[in-house]
């Protein structure tokens, strides 16, 4: 029968082709299978065993392959394998569906629940109550959660009807919803939509708490605006980004971290049968990288972040901090070396220029050109900052001494940006009578005071020294303790003449929040990880400083020091020649040429060495081609890294938002010290997924170890529920609860 001519016209009649020879018609009335146009199998609506028999026989007779039959019948290959095994072991009876449900009447009747509550009310522990009533501790918990009567649970005025909904009995970790049909048709679908089923004791349920804060970062909306969508596949753009953010919040920001999660357990949070694995994550991120739009994504995130500042707080766009970050490389590729202040020596590395807001949260990042200074990067970054800010307001930009350049200060001031930086180099101290006490109250209501001197100074412009042109800038000076005892003065420079002196000092000190961001992100979000191992050849024609010239200059410096010492010694020798011996009555002293030459010989020798060193230094070119100095040097791929950096920025800002909500919207007494630790504990908390209320996705988390933390979690859940956040890609509104402690 399998050698007859194919009749593909069955597909046009609504049938599902299975391989090259069979077609399946399946509807509410039952099903039929045609093999090469001939009716072979028929079953009714309730004859599930016959349907499974037909699927098994298609494989056994060689009409179609296992994966073709599984896709046609809408099951996975494992289910089809079990059907075939049951047919071999028990015949047709083995394919009959087994009635699901309890094997015996439930022990938890209303009378049994009342008995359990009675024992528990007497002060007995969970185990003692379970032993006394002959049930398990889980049954005791369910009995304590049951409502004795409707009148016993009054509802506050104005409470919605959904809050009065009786908590259902959810299945404990049921099998994930079968998505095999969608996986089989993945090439025809843009993405599989999230679908949730009721489930209890979901391991990663605490990660649902991140979605309200994740929405405020704009990652998903900005990615859709920039990329549109990924190529057709089961895992879409939203799924890949949400999965990456959730893994980062759980402590595994790299793609390889997916191996440390059970795909099915993480898939429950994503609304899928299983989460994407490492090769899928890399492939989908690479597809985004091929578009070359990572820079646009970062710019869109920056504009969203700065535009999202609302009333009730300072304007984050008005204060930005800029700093470079060195990402060390430990691989085998030939990467140029950069001095790392953290490691205290030059290492193969790439450098990034980061921009953060007033709170230290990342806003923008660009890959710095190899060998570029912070001052040069700042000049190039100003147009992008202006685009991110979105208007012409003046923006205070803080940075460290690496960006020192009076010419840059003048350029920034003319471009609508105010400078905030430390003064570099030595300068004369400010008179002590000019110092006065100033204060500033921070966002937490804490008042800080300093003794400062507010003056104006003239900085010579390095490019116009011959004309004597200077740039006048405001200087705020402080007296601080010096290393080894005593005091010294430090100076802050700014072009903002209207900012109070106390706030200038506070804002300059706040630049350390950016350093804290680097440290925290390096520890918890793998900031310095190499998400791509690809590299390209560096520009071999790029001009780079010649290290031989630097070494030659060191010899010039040493020769100058030796010349100064020789000059001092020569002066002493000449003075001795011209000074009569003690007690001598001679009024005249004769100094011969030989004596003079002998005294001056060390100086002349040092002078010759200095002249030779200076000539040797001038002969060496300041810069060389990179290809001549270091042929074969490479640079690491930046596109994939920038996409992962954007994801980590969103994860970092999500965590900062949740930690801030814990500090401001809960009564947790140690929130100032433990907000981040409590947040990570909540993210790792198991709980239930409840879909019984139409239009809502209720997440019910297990209580935390202590009553204080549980209360704080309940307050946070109440606040997050009020945001009415929808789960990405669905119309389900997220609601959060904490289970009662029993």
Image (spheres, helix red, strand yellow):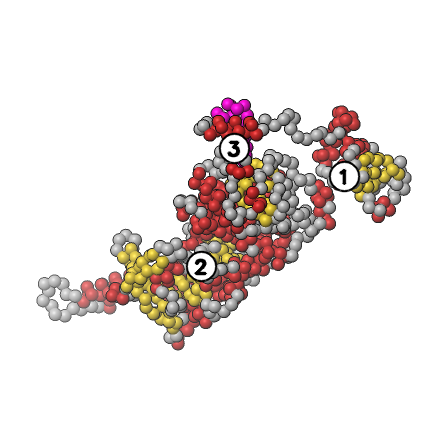
Q: Residue furthest front?
A: 151
Residue at label 3? 144
Residue pointed to by mark 2: 313
Q: Which quadrant: the N terminus?
A: top right
**Could you say where residue 441 lies in the image, as x and y percent from the top left?**
36, 58
**Horizontal side, residue 551 vs residue 605: left or right:** right
- Magenta stretch holds residue 138: yes
Whether residue 203 is visible here, answered yes or no, is no
Q: Is residue 10 visible?
A: yes
340 or 294: nearer the eye? Answer: 294
Could you give the CA–CA distance between mark 3 and mark 2, rounded to whole angstroms?
A: 44 Å
The mark closer to the camera, 2 or 1, is: 2
Residue at image coords 30%, 57% = 480
The location of residue 6, given as percent across then percent down, is 87, 43
Q: Earlier in the sequence, mark 3 or mark 2?
A: 3
Residue occupying the point 59% across, 37% down = 168
The image position of residue 286, as x and y in percent, is: 63, 51
- Residue 473 occupies quadrant: bottom left
For label 1, the residue is: 73
Which secondary structure, mark 3?
A: helix
Residue 261's x, y, as percent? 58, 39
Q: Could you tell whether 242 is left or right of 450 in the image?
A: right
Label 2 – label 1 distance at C-alpha = 58 Å
> What range is drawn magenta here?
128-148
Residue 598: name its quadrant: bottom left
Q: Nearer the viewer, residue 655 or 452?
A: 655
Picture quarter containing residue 300?
Answer: bottom right
**Camera-nearest residue between 57 and 409:** 57
């Amino acid at each position: 029968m399998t050698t007859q001519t194919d009749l593909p016209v069955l597909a046009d009649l609504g049938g599902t082709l299975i391989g090259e020879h069979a077609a399946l018609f399946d509807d509410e009335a039952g099903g039929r299978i045609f093999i090469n146009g001939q009716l072979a199998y028929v079953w009714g609506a309730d004859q599930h065993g016959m349907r499974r028999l037909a699927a098994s026989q298609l494989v056994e007779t060689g009409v179609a392959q296992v994966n073709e039959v599984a896709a046609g019948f809408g099951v996975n290959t494992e289910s089809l394998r079990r059907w075939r095994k049951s047919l071999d072991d028990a015949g047709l009876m083995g394919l009959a569906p087994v009635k699901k449900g309890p094997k015996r009447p439930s022990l938890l009747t209303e009378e049994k629940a009342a008995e359990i509550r009675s024992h528990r009310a007497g002060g007995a522990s969970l185990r003692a109550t379970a032993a006394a009533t002959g049930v398990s501790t889980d049954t005791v918990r369910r009995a304590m959660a049951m409502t004795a009567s409707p009148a016993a649970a009054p509802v506050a005025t104005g409470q919605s009807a959904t809050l009065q909904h009786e908590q259902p009995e959810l299945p404990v970790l049921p099998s994930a919803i079968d998505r095999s049909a969608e996986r089989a048709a993945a090439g025809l679908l843009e993405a599989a939509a999230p679908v949730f089923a009721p489930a209890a004791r979901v391991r990663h349920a605490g990660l649902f708490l991140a979605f309200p804060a994740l929405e405020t970062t704009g990652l998903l909306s900005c990615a859709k605006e920039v990329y549109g969508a990924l190529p057709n596949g089961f895992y879409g753009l939203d799924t890949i980004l949400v999965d990456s953010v959730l893994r980062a919040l759980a402590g595994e920001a790299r793609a390889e971290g997916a191996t440390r999660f059970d795909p099915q357990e993480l898939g429950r949070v994503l609304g899928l049968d299983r989460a994407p694995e490492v090769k899928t994550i890399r492939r989908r991120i690479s597809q985004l990288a091929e578009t070359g739009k990572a820079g646009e994504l970062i710019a869109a995130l920056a504009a969203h972040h700065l535009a999202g500042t609302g009333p009730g707080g300072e304007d984050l766009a008005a204060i930005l901090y800029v700093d470079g970050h060195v990402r060390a490389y430990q691989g085998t590729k030939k990467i140029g070396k950069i001095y790392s202040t953290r490691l205290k020596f030059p290492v193969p590395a790439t450098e990034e220029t980061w921009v953060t807001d007033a709170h230290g949260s990342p806003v923008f990042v660009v890959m710095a050109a190899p060998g570029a200074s912070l001052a040069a990067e700042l000049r190039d970054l100003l147009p992008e900052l202006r685009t991110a800010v979105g208007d012409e307001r003046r923006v205070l930009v803080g940075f460290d001494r690496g960006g020192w350049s009076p010419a840059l200060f003048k350029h920034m001031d003319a471009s609508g940006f105010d400078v905030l930086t430390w003064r570099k180099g030595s300068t004369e101290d400010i008179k002590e009578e000019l110092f006065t006490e100033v204060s500033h109250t921070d966002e937490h209501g804490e008042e800080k005071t300093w003794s400062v001197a507010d003056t104006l100074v003239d900085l010579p412009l390095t490019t116009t020294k011959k004309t004597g042109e200077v740039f006048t800038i405001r200087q705020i000076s402080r007296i601080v303790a010096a290393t080894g005892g005593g005091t010294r003065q430090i100076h802050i420079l700014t072009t903002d003449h209207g900012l109070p002196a106390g706030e200038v000092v506070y804002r300059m000190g706040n630049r350390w929040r950016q350093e804290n961001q680097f440290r925290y992100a390096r520890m918890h979000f793998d900031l310095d990880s190499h998400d791509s191992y690809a590299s390209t050849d560096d520009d071999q024609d790029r001009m780079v400083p010649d290290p031989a010239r630097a070494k030659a200059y060191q010899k010039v410096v040493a020769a100058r020091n030796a010349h100064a010492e020789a000059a001092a010694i020569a002066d002493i020798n000449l003075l001795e020649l011209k000074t009569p011996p003690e007690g001598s009555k001679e009024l005249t002293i004769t100094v011969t040429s030989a004596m003079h030459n002998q005294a001056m010989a060390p100086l002349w020798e040092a002078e010759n060495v200095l002249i030779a060193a200076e000539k040797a230094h001038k002969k060496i070119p300041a810069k060389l081609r990179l290809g001549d100095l270091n042929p074969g040097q490479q640079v690491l791929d930046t596109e994939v890294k920038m996409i992962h950096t954007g994801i980590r920025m969103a994860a970092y800002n999500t965590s900062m938002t949740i930690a801030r909500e814990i500090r401001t919207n809960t009564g947790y007494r140690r929130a100032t010290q433990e907000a981040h630790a409590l947040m990570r504990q909540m993210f790792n908390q198991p709980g239930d997924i409840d879909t019984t209320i139409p239009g809502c996705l209720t997440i019910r988390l297990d209580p935390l170890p202590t009553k204080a933390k549980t209360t704080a979690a309940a307050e946070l859940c109440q606040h997050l529920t009020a945001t009415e956040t929808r789960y990405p890609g669905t119309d389900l509104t997220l609601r959060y609860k904490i289970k009662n402690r029993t």
